[in-house]
Image (cartoon, rainbow, N blue to C red):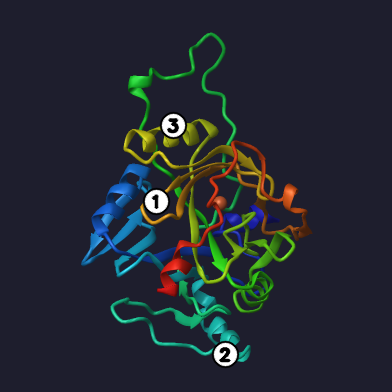
Amino acid sequence: MTQIKRQYGPARRPGELGVHSLDHFALTVPDMEKARAFYEAFGLDARSEGNALGLQTFNGLQRWGLLIEGPTKRMHHLSFGVFEDELDLFKRHVESVGVALLDPPAGIPSNGLWFRDHDGMLIELRAAPKTSPDAKSSGQFQSSPPGVAGAPKRSQSPFIRPTRLAHCLLFTRDVPSAVSFYSRVLGLRLSDRSGDDIAFMHGIHGSDHHLIAFARSNAPGLHHCSWDVRSLDEIGLGAMQMVGKGYRDGWGLGRHVLGSNYFHYVRDPWGSYSEYSCDMDYIPVDQNWIAGNHDAEDAFYVWGPNPPQDWTHNHEADQQKR
Ligand SMILES: [Fe+2]
């Protein structure tokens, strides 16, 4: 059934309203050149858009990130993709659940719907191609057949370029309220959670285990953006690529429990992180995932080094106090 549908377009769950993709994130940052240097080293295509910087991957035209100059690093907005023929339905739906629609922010061209979430963060719903995958992304690999050496010479290691934005982890004042809002208004579904500390959500039209996640804090903010690479080997190569460019701080190599992905996080110039990720659990369009509530020990990582001491510190909250 699913295969038949895919001959005619992306995976789509009939008769149910929900965003299909995390389209892009937008941040203000205080130093555009530092931002460009970091994300280019990470393997992204940073392109000037007037005074802003767009973050693309090298395999298409999708802009996954937008960086706008501002006094501090801070979440500006989060944009989700919806099927074009559902934008009007979403407009009526958002209004019907009592959420006020807003004009697009100044300087951001948009024909999408804008509103604020439970925590005051700006959200856009835009008609856009489905960029969340229609099948599980790769992760395991065999580097060479028997009788052939698999590893490249270190001096000839490939430069790692992620293939897509995978998800964002956001800080929020209230995780259950976040789950309620994003379920009710955007049609996302809970994948797994650990009490009221962290929750992971997926799209209903075929999606990774999470395209967005929420962690408890005293203010909204971005903890990390995550980028899919092709293999565990590429995660290791990416980590070394960043060390070679002077970005030594981070966390990894490891494997998460919820979502199951392998990871290495690199600390950005503002104390948040960019994650190399692969082999994330996948929730097909025709499956209803049973969400679990997991003890903290079973919600974080299976193996890996100890996380940095300030792993859960919200640097954006510090700035908001000033
Ligand atoms: Fe992540």
Closer to the chain start, of discs 2 and 1, is 2
Q: Which residue is mark 1?
A: 268
Tell me whether circle 1 and circle 3 mark residues in contact (CB < 8 Å). no
What x and y, as percent, mark residue 248?
40, 38
Mark 2 CB in 8 Å range of ligand 1? no
159 relative to 293 in the view: left or right: left
How many marks are shown on the rendered structure? 3
Q: For residue 322, which quarter of the picture?
A: bottom left
Q: Which one is nearer the viewer's eye here, 165 or 266?
A: 266
Mark 3 CB in 8 Å range of ligand 1? no
172 relative to 67 in the view: left or right: right
Residue at x 56% of width, y 56% of height: 312
Q: Which one is nearer the viewer's eye here, 6 or 158?
A: 158
Q: Which residue type does callout 2 highlight?
A: Glu
What distance separates the C-alpha of mark 1 from that of mark 3?
18 Å
What distance separates the C-alpha of mark 2 from that of mark 1?
37 Å
Give the SS element for disc 1. Answer: loop
Residue at x 69% of width, y 46% of height: 257
Label 2 CA crowd tier, 10 Å (few <14, some 14–19, many 20+): few
Residue at x 66% of width, y 78% of height: 184
What distance separates the C-alpha of mark 3 from that of mark 2?
47 Å
Q: Which residue type does callout 1 highlight?
A: Asp
Q: Which residue type does callout 3 highlight?
A: Leu
Instruction: Identify the disc placed on residue 237.
Output: 3
What x and y, as percent, mark residue 254?
59, 38
Q: Which residue is mark 2?
A: 95
What x and y, as percent, mark residue 311?
54, 51
Of circles 3 and 2, the one toward us is 3
Label 3 CA crowd tier, 10 Å (few <14, some 14–19, many 20+): some
